[in-house]
Image (spheres, rainbow, N blue to C red):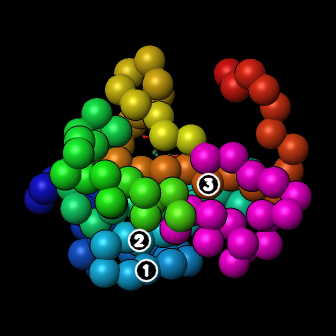
Amino acid sequence: MTDCIFCKIAAHELNAQVVYEDEDFMAFRDINPEAPVHVLLIPKQHLSSLLEVGVEQADLAARLLMTAAGIARELGVAEDGFRVVINTNDNGGQTVHHLHLHLLGGRFMNWPPG
Ligand code: AMP
């Protein structure tokens, strides 16, 4: 989508601190980090939210999770532990309407979240 900031990052039209990229995914540092490691992992394909993940995206969704785990290992937070979050719509706190997975690590994560 032309007015989507994450599509622009995926297309290299907007700068981001990219930590991972392949044909289908990009991961970059959150501009407002909530933890020492706070990375956003997005599919390059524009899907507005998790609600747009259907059977056709099953492979993409599986690889999204595997890629997140790989990035956690690469960034050195896998062993101590980390959290992945997909905020969805208003009550979920979603502010950018391009599917993204938050990968948070480097500190203890409280539960329940706020
Ligand atoms: P959410 O609230 O789950 O939709 O998360 C959106 C996240 O995107 C927030 O944590 C923002 O800090 C982050 N964000 C917004 N714009 C940018 C940007 N240009 N580069 C990196 N992170 C961004």
Quick check: is 76 in the magenta stretch? yes
Q: Position of residue 3 (x, y in %)?
A: 16, 53
Q: Position of residue 28 (x, y in %)?
A: 51, 68
Please give the residue where the numbered disc 2 appears in the rendered image: 26
Look at the numbered discs 2 and 3 and tell me whether their residues touch, using CB distance below 8 Å. no
**Residues drawn in magenta:** 67-84
Tell me the distance, in whole angstroms, between the alpha carbons under discs 1 and 2.
4 Å
Query: Splitting the image into 4 quarters, where does residue 51 fall?
Result: top left
Q: Is residue 53 above or below residue 82?
A: above
Look at the numbered discs 1 and 2 and tell me whether their residues touch, using CB distance below 8 Å. yes
At x 71%, y 61%, the residue is 37
Tell me the amino acid under the disc marked 1. Answer: Glu
Please give the residue where the numbered disc 1 appears in the rendered image: 21
Q: Position of residue 92 (x, y in %)?
A: 46, 25
Tell me the amino acid under the disc marked 3. Answer: Leu
Task: Tell me the SS state at disc 3.
Answer: strand
At x 38%, y 21%, the residue is 90
Q: Earlier in the sequence, mark 1 or mark 2?
A: 1
Q: Is residue 62 visible?
A: yes
Task: Tell me the SS state at disc 1.
Answer: strand
Tell me the distance, in whole angstroms, between the alpha carbons under discs 3 and 1.
15 Å
Q: Is residue 33 visible?
A: no
Tell me the amino acid under the disc marked 2. Answer: Met
Query: Splitting the image into 4 quarters, where does residue 44 fall?
Result: bottom left
